[in-house]
Amino acid sequence: MVRLYLKRHAPRSTSLMIVTAALLVAVLTSAPPVRADDGSAWQATEAWSAQWEDRYSRWVAEDFGEDFFIKGRWAGISTDCADAVYAARIIFSYDNKLPFALSGTKERAAEWTNTTKDFASIKDPDSRVRAFIRRLNNRTWTGSLEKHTAPVVISRGSVRPGTLWLKPGHVEVVKSVSDTGVLELQGSWLPASIRQMITITTLGHAPKNMKTGFRRWLWPNETAPSVDADAGNYLLANEASETNSESNIDSFESSVQKALALQGSTERKGSRVQRLAYDFCRMAHARAEVVRLGREFMARGSQAASCMVPRDYHLYSTPSRDSNLRRVVWALGSEFDHNQIGFIRLLLAGCPMIEGAGYKIDASDFLVNLLKFNFSSDPHEPEAARFGTEAPQGICTMTY
């Protein structure tokens, strides 16, 4: 009788505790077992799909900012332009348990996948992935992206955040596409360094074949699909021109912008000149960093008494960068019928002063020096000569 009474009249809280305990036991016994560390860079439990590419696109737009490698969890990763886009794809794959694998020789195939066991001795998961990134970035470059990506047609559905813009010797990732078809392109640059990336809106290149242009990442084990030449992005370039002249690049950029714009949306002239001025400012300051790194390299050890070998000269010289800056200047000047320099000085009034060892110059004055070819691309020259505030010294003969 006493037992029956207690069972019928037990407090409600006791019954709740019994039910809760039973549910907890059920959850614990039905939960999947925690995977043991198998020594791989990370273990993939998901698979790439159109839905995951949509998430990657949103991640690039919202989370992959200019300061991604200098602040937060992934701070301290050294990048050049190719390093930055490879590292972004690796980190997203790791965080979302997706596979990462690049095509390559049989010897390298095992090194270029998340299943590699080469970093098993590193116990911290993030540190293991950092080691994987360092190895891959030491063995890849802009030229290798041709094998690891595929061209896409120029349409609003294909060119979106996460799409790569590849040109000879440089790559950037699309951050956004405006209603008027203007692209924001984010990237790092040579030489590799721990730096804040920059975002610009000018393409600076007109593809002539399917090796450059807008591209997407290939999925692991995916063979690059064939692309209909009639839909190839390089056909928007002026086929009559044999070189990447300013007029040809401008024509290509206009065609791209028109193809990506929403119906009825066009960019106003005022908006265009402001963004071109912004591009010039960002690019000029990025050039100043390259110039500074070149001087620091020349000042180190025995290098101070010799000239650079071709590889180092390639890292610290700026001929391509200077040509791109001149193209932006050309595009800016084409927007005005008269007094171009006066208008451009007003546009650049908010650009911080460019300065370094032995020089200090206003952005608009450097623009004038570019027009007059009063500057040096040679990394052997003092910083002041690189920006045209003093004459070049002819320190080393440029033979390569």
Image: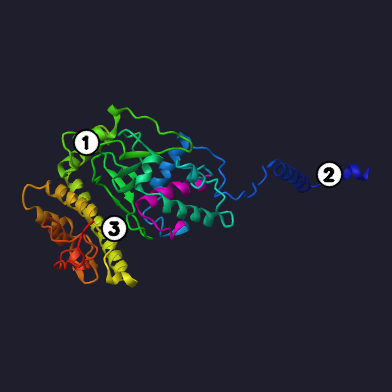
Percent from the top left, x then y, of residue 341?
10, 55
Tell me which segment is drawn in magenta: 74-96
Q: Which mark is residue 310?
A: 3
Residue contact between numbered discs 3 and 1, judged by CB atoms under 8 Å: no
Percent from the top left, x then y, of residue 325?
20, 53
What's the residue type where badge 3 is placed?
Answer: Pro
Q: What residue would you read off at disc 1? A: 237
Measuring 24% from the left and 54% from the top, which residue is drawn there?
321
Answer whether residue 88 is magenta in the image: yes
Q: CA distance from mark 2 to mark 3?
A: 90 Å
Question: In the rendered image, which quarter contains the N terminus?
Answer: top right
Examine the image and state in which quarter residue 67 appears: bottom left
Q: How is the image coloured?
A: rainbow
Examine the image and state in which quarter residue 80 appears: bottom left
Percent from the top left, x then y, of residue 53?
44, 38
Tell me the chief SS of the magenta region.
Answer: helix
Q: CA distance from mark 3 to mark 1?
A: 32 Å
Q: Which mark is residue 52?
A: none
- Compared to residue 314, the image places residue 3 above or below, namely above
Q: Which residue of the protein is positioned furthest toward the right in this rendering?
A: 1
Query: Disc 2 on helix, strand or loop?
Result: loop
Q: What residue would you read off at disc 2? A: 9
- Compared to residue 80, the image places residue 385 above or below, namely below
What's the residue type where badge 2 is placed?
Answer: His
Query: Disc 3 on helix, strand or loop?
Result: helix
